[in-house]
Image (cartoon, rainbow, N blue to C red):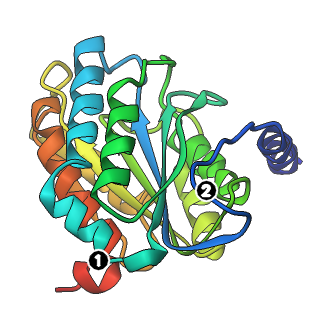
Amino acid sequence: MMAAMRGGFLFAAALGLAIQTQHATAGQTVALELVLAIDTSTSVDDSEYRLQRDGLSRAFEHPSVVRAIESQGAEGIAVSVVQWAGTRQQFEAVPWAFMNNRSSAAEFAARIAAMPRSLKGFTDIADVIDYSVLYFERNAFDGRRRVIDVSGDGTSDREDPAISRDAAILRGVTINGLIIHSIEYDLGDLARFDLQNHYRDKVIGGEGAFLLNAESFRTFGQSIREKLVREIAGPLFAAR
């Protein structure tokens, strides 16, 4: 009964999303639809948030990411940024945008660079997965692949994300993870191991799914750049 109520709420919330698109036509086919879900929970302070934002922005200007985007040809990709924290705390921070070349990637990078922080709270990975799956349904794109990129520095303190992960996989969605090891909250090797296991066992999944680690928020930019190249190029790249 609770699952049904939760599903009904998420569906109603999705219907209420006012999603903007750029350079898109209804049902436009793209090689990839990518949700970049970045953690803005309370464990992430404002300087760490800026490191995430700036690292992500610079990644879309990096030659390796631009080459990956251009490798998708005229079909291109559609990308959006979602900030997330606790239950029912998700925010469309940068609306869906289409890109297939350097100039469109640079435009998206500029929008990320201007992105303010909109949320703080607990950590509910399950809810951001549910939100993102429905978020795919409310844009103007039809992706050959759909990927949710979840980055965060902690385990879920609400629902078990494996349930949401498995439901997403059944709908053809891949979920990749990027763990950020926070120096401020570093509890040692055992805690790091537990965090990696949490993401590996309960968060990532789907075709070509993978998990990366950023040693700190300061190295987030380098890690997200590597992750974007792999996600845009697709499972064949990940298998090399």
The crowd level at tag 1 (other Cα within 10 Å; few <14, some 14-19, many 20+) is some
* 124 displayed left or right of 199: right
Q: Is residue 113 visible?
A: yes
* 94 displayed left or right of 136: left
Q: Nearer the viewer, residue 186 or 114?
A: 114
**Residue 19 vertical placement versus 83 (above, below):** below
- SS at mark 2? helix
Amino acid type of the residue that numbered disc 1 sits on in the rendered structure = Ser
Identify the mark at residue 220; answer none if there is no mark: none
Q: From the image, which quarter does the C terminus lie in?
A: bottom left
- What residue is shown with label 1? 71
Give the image location of residue 28, x and y in percent: 64, 70
Quadrant for residue 210, please give it. Answer: bottom left
- What residue is shown with label 2? 164
Residue depicted at 40% across the width and 48% down the height: 150
Residue depicted at 15% across the width and 62% down the height: 64
Identify the mark nearer the N-term, 2 or 1: 1
The crowd level at tag 2 (other Cα within 10 Å; few <14, some 14-19, many 20+) is many
Q: Nearer the viewer, residue 13 or 191?
A: 13
**Residue 80 vertical placement versus 116 (above, below):** below
Give the image location of residue 29, x and y in percent: 60, 75
Residue depicted at 26% across the width and 49% down the height: 60
Give the image location of residue 86, x and y in percent: 55, 27
Amino acid type of the residue that numbered disc 2 sits on in the rendered structure = Ser
Residue depicted at 62% across the width and 48% down the height: 21
Mark in front: 2 vs 1: 1
Q: Nearer the viewer, residue 208 or 115?
A: 115
Q: Is residue 230 visible?
A: no
- SS at mark 1? loop
Quadrant for residue 26, please give it. Answer: bottom right
Q: Are marks 2 and 1 in contact (CB under 8 Å)?
A: no
